[in-house]
Image (cartoon, grey):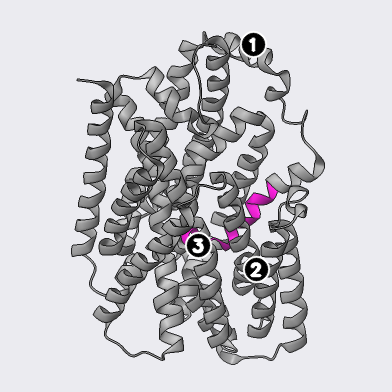
Amino acid sequence: MSGDIYQLIAIIIYMIGMLLIGWYAYKRTSNLSDYMLGGRSLGPAVTALSAGASDMSGWLLMGLPGAVYVSGLVEVWIAIGLTVGAYLNWVFVAPRLRAYTQVSNDSITIPSFLDNRLKENSRILRIVSGIIILVYFTFYVSSGMVAGGVFFQSSFGLDYHTGLILCSAVVIAYTLFGGFLAVSYTDFVQGLIMFLALILVPVFGIFITGGPAETFESIRQVDPNLLSFFATATAAGVISSLAWGLGYFGQPHIIVRFMAIKSVKETKSARRIGIGWMALSLIGATFTALIGIAYFQQNPGASLTDPEAIFIDLGQIIFHPFIAGIMLAAVLAAIMSTISSQLLVTSSALVEDIYKDVFNSKATEQRYVSLGRLSVLVVAIVAMIFAWQQNDTILGLVAFAWAGFGASFGPIILLSIYWRKITGIGALSGMVVGAITVFVWGNTELSGVLYEIVPGFVLNLIITVVVSLMTYKPNAEVDREFDETLKIIENESK
């Protein structure tokens, strides 16, 4: 049996497993809250790994290793920024958002929470939030689909478009039918696969490059600067990389997991699991790239067609074809977990936050679930059209969408759960300024100087605070909900 057949069998087993999980979740989904938020029933392990898997995407196994392979450890500043940002997100956002979204009319999406929390200018704020999610997530989903096409092209020699369609079809199927529970359960399994793969590749890879000393010596022969965090760095570059951490506060597909966990108390256990998983995975991705540099220096006859496929190529070199197939499934898991989460959040924005408000709809729960599934399909098709021409790196597409969400929603989420004086017009003004700043800055040469999330986040924060102070009026209902949230946090933290 040829190596490709073994690998194909592993991929098929993985895909069937994902579809079976989708079917299981489908049987447990009966209303819109189940479809969009899983009935707030997630345990800490599922919450942590599903948040991590939906966060990291193909960037973890393709984008980051590819960047480190080309530029060296200077690219690790992004990983450092992300780890710090994720930790702060778990500490400062997760408990309060879990409590506040339930207190404030049991909100099941970020736009609906802002609507219920702020009590004024809420309809337009909710619609604008939904539109921002729709626009930027279309780019984000597109990046995942590009990664899927590259995956099948690099692994099996398939045409890029064939791989794009195959990957998209499976993830659309289980997301469309199973909703949030399917996405969370598949993310949990996918997170485990990704973690194991990122540990195994560097652990076994170090042996084929001769051990640590020989590996680092081979890297130095290529370019000593590859092992330096600072040699090729600039102050603006380091700030831009660390600023990726700011994005966590505003990523709807990540913070929605905080809303779905069973209780505030369990966010602490989820944080420990999630940050441990993330730190070890990022270290594994970095060492995968470094070992790849050493291997191809030691074996000049071997060729690497695409730096972003370094993890895939090493897995095929090191392991038996079936195990290599499982490594390939890890890449597919990273890609599919993020696509599914983003499709679901975009669907919820269309149905829960735009359709309901614009048309003032009073349809049945089953009707809303059906519309949610239709939205998943429509958004996926539009994203596939964007992804059809592979005209950007995976990291480039992710960076633009990440900045868009971080700068649009990050300051608003933080102020909403920590500052009772934020107003609807203040939030709306800041959100629009943040989104536009990222879009304009990111499409000019300025993006090469400073990552667009920095000016977008700062301007959003300033505008929101200033306008809110100018327009604030005491609201008894807002104060009651704010105080009730603080009591829940205090009681469940004991």
Where is the N terminus found, in terms of image quarters?
top left
Give the percent coordinates (x, y) of residue 415. 65, 71
Name the residue at 34% across, 50% down.
Answer: 165
Name the residue at 46% across, 56% down.
Answer: 141
Mark 1 closeness class: few <14, some 14–19, many ≥20 residues within 10 Å: few
Residue occupied by mark 2:
435
**Pick the front one: 350 or 422:** 350
The residues colored magenta run 242-254
Residue occupied by mark 3:
137
* Quarter of the view holding residue 248: bottom right
- Measured in 3D between alpha carbons, the distance from the residue under mark 3 to the one under mark 1, in whole angstroms, is 42 Å
Residue 297 as seen in the image, left or right of residue 52 = right
Residue 213 as seen in the image, left or right of residue 41 = right
Q: Which circle's residue, 3 or 2, is located before the other in the chain?
A: 3
**Pick the front one: 444 or 237:** 444
> Mark 1 and mark 2 in contact (Cβ < 8 Å)?
no
Q: Main secondary structure of the magenta part?
A: helix
Amino acid at dot 3: Phe
Amino acid at dot 1: Glu
Residue occupied by mark 1:
217
